[in-house]
Image (tube, grey):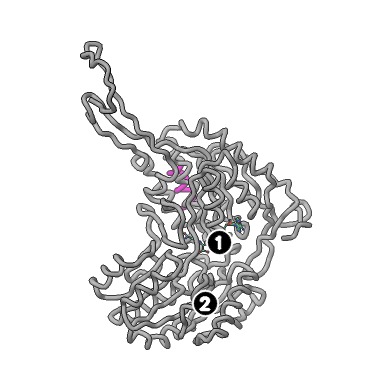
Amino acid sequence: MNASLTPGQTAVQSAKLLINGQWVESQTSEWRDIVNPATQQVLAHVPFATPDEVNAAVAAAHEAFKTWRHTPLGARMRIMLKLQALVREHSKRIALTLSAEQGKTVADAEGDIFRGLEVVEHACSIGTLQMGEFAENVAGGVDTYTLRQPIGVCAGITPFNFPAMIPLWMFPMAIVCGNTFVLKPSEQDPLSTLMLVELALEAGVPPGVLNVVHGGKEVVDAICTHPDIKAVSFVGSTAVGTHVYDLAGRHGKRVQSMMGAKNHAVVLPDANRAQTLNALAGAAFGAAGQRCMATSVAVLVGSTKEWIPELKALAQKLKVNAGSEAGTDVGPVISKRAKERVLSLIASGVEQGATLELDGRDVVVPGYEEGNFVGPTLFSGVTTDMRIYTEEIFGPVLVVLTVDTFDEAIALVNRNPFGNGTGLFTQSGAAARKFQSEIDVGQVGINIPIPVPVPFFSFTGSRGSKLGDLGPYGKQVVQFYTQTKTVTARWFDDDSVNDGVNTTINLR
Ligand code: NAD
């Protein structure tokens, strides 16, 4: 944090707050640099909003809800149609900023935007998604139907690793359901998120319906305790997500926390060898391992332990470089702090007796000597008590465990505290069916290394990877962002027969 930096004193831009349709300069004295992780160039400054600014954003959302909730479905849907067209049009431009502030390759940044865009496309179907149900004649002349009504001001708190996709999981679905929204992007890379918010305003989202505040713990806690916020959607680490779930839950809000991961890929001897090894290398080291769905543990069953040298050879071929350079496979990790943490976990693996097959610690990238690079790192001989197995590393580090049987592999995955994603590599339908039935993990890939569901389904998770019943997109999120009202109705004709007084609970 560099508190001495104020926007007027520096050449770089400051990230603005969005309150009631106006981009405003924060009056805070607390600022943080947004840094290109490949070069350490300061791209902009982000404010940690004051309590008054958070209150102003919530007040704007609270006021806007009074009218927005009555806006016809078609009008809301047409804003989403416009937004999807704008995001598509500006995707390349946003991807360059996203790559610069986050470090991922430009192609992967476009993927980040595209996976969010798919949710905006899904939001365009709100007419059918938000439909209630109707049952005619549940008793004599009585009908019952449900309304799915918006709940009020909702809030979203997002992580650094997908600055486009995850905000797009949240605000489009929330506002298309008739809610208003306060977004708190990651303070590490909010610039591309703000570009998407600008497009939402251009698409016609009215003042106050979407607001943005920046900050860290204090702002998040203010959101979780604000009496006018009805629902909080969080995506980030397990420690923070558990805190948010607890705090916001105690303050009467609906909460969903999508959290950390340790994703296991189980490899059976009958798997397609080349395809499996390519999938493992891509899913472990792509995006520098900073995906919540990255493969971070390979569980090699039986004879597949002989595949380790080939896996190492593939990992060695990956090109570590700045995300802006053509041909890059592995960009930098987000910050110097994140790099130090990854390096210390690698050191712990060596100390605890794992075999370091490939060491990415000393990678130096010519022209980007200051970048936060860690090269692909591969451990074998890993046991479940080692920190490199128990902790989420969130860097380009793959740990390999070997087991004798498929049952042992399933038990191992189910014993891990996280339950975000997993994959099985096999050519056996029976094995795949057993795996999908017995595994206690939210996203399951069968010969698919990163099985992030498309938005007609919902992202989910179990155990230490998710708290809350409903997922962050798909049909489930329509339930999260709406309240069901059940109406039971009867209408009398002028000449209807007088039923007399009914003192029972029964309808007749
Ligand atoms: P993080 O938990 O550090 O930060 C997430 C958000 O919480 C940010 O907006 C941050 O400002 C805020 N925050 C940070 N510390 C806080 C505190 N003490 N109190 C309150 N708020 C706080 O996560 P990150 O490092 O930005 O993102 C990486 C993590 O997110 C990984 O654990 C990854 O697995 C997880 N993730 C999960 C999913 C999923 O869907 N399950 C998706 C993406 C990322």
Q: Is residue 169 above or below residue 288?
A: above
Q: Is residue 401 above or below residue 243?
A: below
Residue at coordinates 40% horizontally, 44% vertically from top-left? 479
Q: How far apart are marks 1 and 2 (CA)?
A: 17 Å
What secondary structure is found at the residue carrying circle 2?
Answer: helix
Q: Which stretch appears magenta?
A: 80-88
Quadrant where ligand 1 appears:
bottom right
Assess disc 2: are there few (<14), some (14-19) or many (≥20) residues with their C-alpha within 10 Å of its C-alpha: many
Residue at coordinates 24% horizontally, 74% vertically from top-left? 428
**Which label's residue is closer to the chain start, 1 or 2?**
1
Image-based side of 228 in relation to 446, left or right: right
Does label 1 point to a residue whose CB lies under 8 Å from ligand 1?
yes
Residue 141 image-quadrant placement: top left
Disc 1 residue type (three-letter): Ala
Q: Please give the residue where the numbered disc 1 appears in the rendered image.
A: 239
Q: Is residue 171 above or below residue 163?
A: above
